[in-house]
Image (cartoon, rainbow, N blue to C red):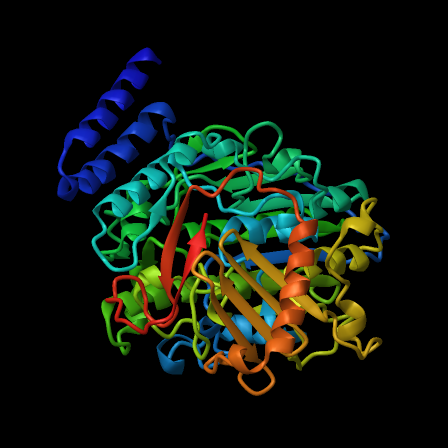
Amino acid sequence: MLRKFIYIAGTLLLLGSIAWEFKLNILMWSMPKIGSIIYPIHENIPTSWSEGPEVVRQDDRPNIILILADDMGYNDISSHNGGAADGSLKTIHIDALANSGILFSRGYAANATCAPSRASIMTGRYPTGFGYEFTPVPAPGRLILSWIAEEDDSELKGRINKELSRNLPPFMEQGMPTEQITIAEVLQDAGYYTAHIGKWHLGHANGMDPLSQGFEDSLSLVGPLYAPEDHPDIVNAKFDTRIDKMIWSLGQYSARFNEGDLFAPDKYVTDYYTDEALKVIEKNKNRPFFLYLSHWAVHNPLQALQSDVEQMSHMSGHNLQVYAGMIAALDRSVGKVVAKLKDLEIYGKTLIIFTSDNGGANYIELEDINKPYRGWKISFFEGGIRVPYIVSWPEEINSGQKSDSPVHHFDIFSTIAAAAKVTPSNEKEIDGVNLLPFIKKEKLSQPHKTLFWRSGNHQSVLHENWKYIISKKENIRWLFDTSTDPLEKNNIIDIHPEETNLIEGLLSKFNSEQKEPLFPSAYEVPILIDKYDGEQYVEGDEYIYWSN
């Protein structure tokens, strides 16, 4: 072990002494090697999912499947604005799922980055209500961000607090507080079998891991790669953006079952997780189960199967073809899950929710993924937080429905709990609402009058038809009337002082009720609203500074 730490220390010292143009390449070369030394990766290890009874239990509660995509843009599903490549990629299975129940066109993520959104989904609360405000970043990622800030000579520069960055808790300890009650814990206590597959990103140390947070079994993502980079059946797409280089530098192709040894799955990760989900469904078809299928797709690094990319040859550009291939694999996953439920004759009694943790990212250099909305992941403009949001339950929800009512990630908790006929012990703390009465037209009002988003310097409020956005230190403010300007094109803050004062008062009250962040923001980065990462800032371009 001492030799391992000497190797790591020596590598980092070497990095610190090398010119900037070589630092990142050295890091990308060294980090996977360091990781494989500390945590050796075995060949594929078969999973051993818990198995339910051989005969059907007399229980009328539904099975529940929550499918969460990662960084999926609003326009990535063809139910919205045509899908990738102006409609030439059809997400037929996701569209069919939407047609079988209800598609919420104004489904909102809890945050514009992944970890707080996931915490909100799991708890039914604003993540800021228990201090989970920022997304944990591994130490190498913070190192890269500090290099960027040091070397950046652009007009808009990132701001790094090195002292805070050095004193942050270890990555695995930057998780959701264990006293928070998850929907998995609620369902497990009610007799449900609970299984987690894929990304977690809510901590793994000190009881933060999925097995300690209500899941009986867990197959976790460890490395961000979908397959080995040099696999002959894989097509990669890389970008000259810092975030993309950071992700590749952290690259491991690995998973872990029930917190056991790391191993390399035996196929492309999206298909691997899907096939494992089918095993869970098959083994537990005779008892109520909760399956949280948390895909890495379509987060970068962009990697797709050659067979999927070949179907996208009509599209313009290698990057788009690979990205579309990744969407096709995710869509295939949804189709396989639904087909398995139908084969087992449990489809009608299964509640399926499909959404994404935030909007599409600016660092994959594809401009239409959040079309027609402005902004990206890492901003509270609609492109960063408006996401696919589908609820299907054939025996209980009429098919073919669409709704433009604003709904939020934290509503998933209450909706699932109500479907399972469970009252959470912390019901008074829950911010979300049960959507079923609204879906069934038992309630004709809107589920929410006001919604809030906060990530340090960048904050937003949706109050009735008014959308307010602020980048605080810069005092850059926007106000939009979403009833006439849903695309957030016309900033009318100067001509609506009364409405602005009202909403700023609501935001001030909300902030006074939230907890201090569990770990501080160590950096702030500028995000252009209308240009993807790498495009040149021009005076007059609108931007925010994002804290994390």
Q: Position of residue 129 (x, y in %)?
A: 67, 48
Q: Is residue 534 visible?
A: yes
Q: Position of residue 292 (x, y in %)?
A: 61, 51
Q: Residue at x 20, y 31 (%)?
A: 15
Q: Is residue 53 visible?
A: no
Q: Identify which residue, 183 or 395, lies in the foreground.
A: 183
Q: Position of residue 507 (x, y in %)?
A: 64, 61
Total labels: the figure holds 0
Q: Quadrant of residue 9?
A: top left
* Left/right of residue 476 with respect to residue 508 in the rendered view: left
Looking at the picture, does residue 84 appear above or below residue 294?
A: below
Q: Position of residue 90 (x, y in %)?
A: 44, 77
* Left/right of residue 202 with respect to residue 548 in the rendered view: right
Looking at the picture, does residue 19 appear above or below residue 64?
A: above
* Left/right of residue 3 with respect to residue 482 in the rendered view: left
Q: Quadrant of residue 13?
A: top left
Q: Quadrant of the N terminus?
A: top left
Which residue extends farthest bottom?
A: 484
Looking at the picture, does residue 74 appear above or below residue 165?
A: below
Q: Residue at x 49, y 69 (%)?
A: 477
Q: Residue at x 24, y 37 (%)?
A: 27
Q: Identify which residue, 462 or 445, lies in the foreground.
A: 462
Q: Residue at x 46, y 30 (%)?
A: 170
Looking at the picture, does residue 306 appear above or below residue 248?
A: below
